[in-house]
Each structure stands twice: as structure tokens, then as C-alpha cells.
Image (cartoon, helix red, strand yellow):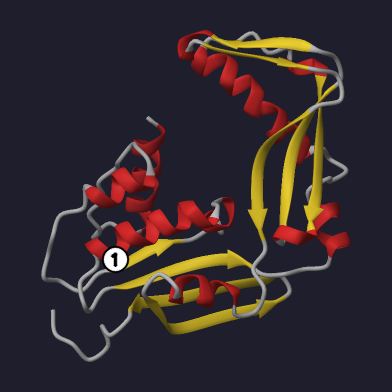
Amino acid sequence: MMIKNAGNEILEMFPNWQIRGKIGTFLQGISSLPDTSDTRLFLFLGSTIGNMTDEEISLLLSAMSQKMGSRDVFLVGVDLEKEKSQLEAAYNDGNCVAALTNLNTLSHLNWRFDGNIRVDEFDHQSFYNASCQRMESHVLALEGQCIKLRELDFSVDIRRGETIRTEIMRKFPKGGLEELFRRRGFEIAGQWCSQDPAYGVFLFRRVGAAGRGA
């Protein structure tokens, strides 16, 4: 229902578009795209790529490279480097939005996989990991408990004071995203960056694709 509603909202703004919803992983979505000789623009906005590890990005770009034609381009949005104090303030906001969102991850696990997690016995933690150039969100166990996700036949004992990392939010340095893509067979075709907020939108194509026909 969520996918359908989102598609309908977009169609209200752009009634001439054709929209097809897809539920699955990014890789499943990419593999399901039909082949075509038309020139296509692939979008990956919202800094979603910042939630992925290098290995996950490599798998994504490999799938994209196989699907993209010589005239296709790939538009990617990312958060850029910011001061540590600015980042930690944003992810530990006074309204507790980040904390509630983080703890809701545990509630979702309970709902999705028939879990027994006592969510009120966890606290939100978010900090900047300088060595990895990323923010990390964790949940901190205030008491020990045995977590069970029955639908997955999974259980784990969590001790008081232990944390579970729930999310990473990478902040790319100048040139960092371009280098990451270059090592995987892509080249920059355009970029648009702002200073406040420090955010960038980058346009990539496959290496050697410029000037070739479809």
C-alpha cells in the first residue's frame, strides 16, 4: 500500500509519467528493469548510498554497470563532510526524533519477525566514527536480555552495556565518492554541491561510455 500511495502522489505532480512499483532489495530492483535502447537516467538520491558499506556499494555498482547502456547516466545524492559537533548534534537532537527512529528499529523487528525485544530497556546512542568518516547509530542495552526472533529461528544474549549498531551514515570527503565510483568502472559527468547544508549530487556514467552510441 505504501508503494502504491507513493506512486499515486508522484503521478499527481507528473501525470504524464508511467510508474511501476517494486518491492525488494536494490539489487532485485535493478535486475528487474527491462532492457531498452532508450537513454535512461537512474536516480539514487536521499543520501541512501551513505547507509551502505564499500562491499554493498560495489555490488550495487556492478549491477548498475551491467544494466546501464552506453548513453545512460546515474545520478547519486550524498551527504558531504561536516564538523563532528554539527553531526553529533543533528543525530542527538533535543526533540528525540533520531532516538525514537532508532529505537523503532527494535519495535519493527518484534513486529516483523515475532520478536521478544524489551525496547524500553534500550537507549539511543549516536556518534561520529572518525576512522570510517561516518556517523553510527547504536542501541545500548540498559539491562541484559535474551533476544529471540522466532520467525528467523534466531536468538542472542545481550549483556547490560553492550550495543547493537543499527545504522551507518557516511559523510563523503571532497573527491571521495568519485574515487569510490572510479575504482568500479564509472567516471564523473557532472556535479552540483552546496555548502550549507553540505550536500552533493553527482552524475556518473560508465568509463568510456561518452561519445559511444547505444
Image location of residue 91, percent across then percent down: 78, 48
Image location of residue 5, percent across then percent down: 38, 38
Query: Disc 1 on helix, strand or loop?
Result: helix
Name the residue: 48% across, 53% down.
55
Is 120 situated above or below 11? above
- Which residue is at the far bottom? 211
Is 126 situated above or below 58? above
With 99 as the anchor, is 49 left or right in this view?
left
Is 84 situated above or below 95? below
Residue that badge 1 annotates = 65
Of residues 145 and 211, the one nearer the viewer is: 145
With 143 as the anchor, is 194 left or right in this view?
left
Residue 63 falls in image quadrant? bottom left
Image quadrant holding the N terminus, namely top left
Name the residue: 30% across, 41% down.
22
With 188 as the anchor, is 94 left or right in this view?
right
Say few, some or many: other residues with alpha carbon within 10 Å of mark 1 (under 14 / 14 to 19 / 20 or more): some
Name the residue: 44% across, 76% down.
182
> Which three-letter amino acid code belongs to the residue tagged 1?
Ser
Of residues 1 and 130, the one nearer the viewer is: 130
Of residues 22 and 209, the one nearer the viewer is: 209
Is 208 situated above or below 109? below
Residue 207 falls in image quadrant? bottom left
Name the residue: 15% across, 71% down.
38
Residue 25 falls in image quadrant? top left
Image location of residue 100, percent across then percent down: 74, 32
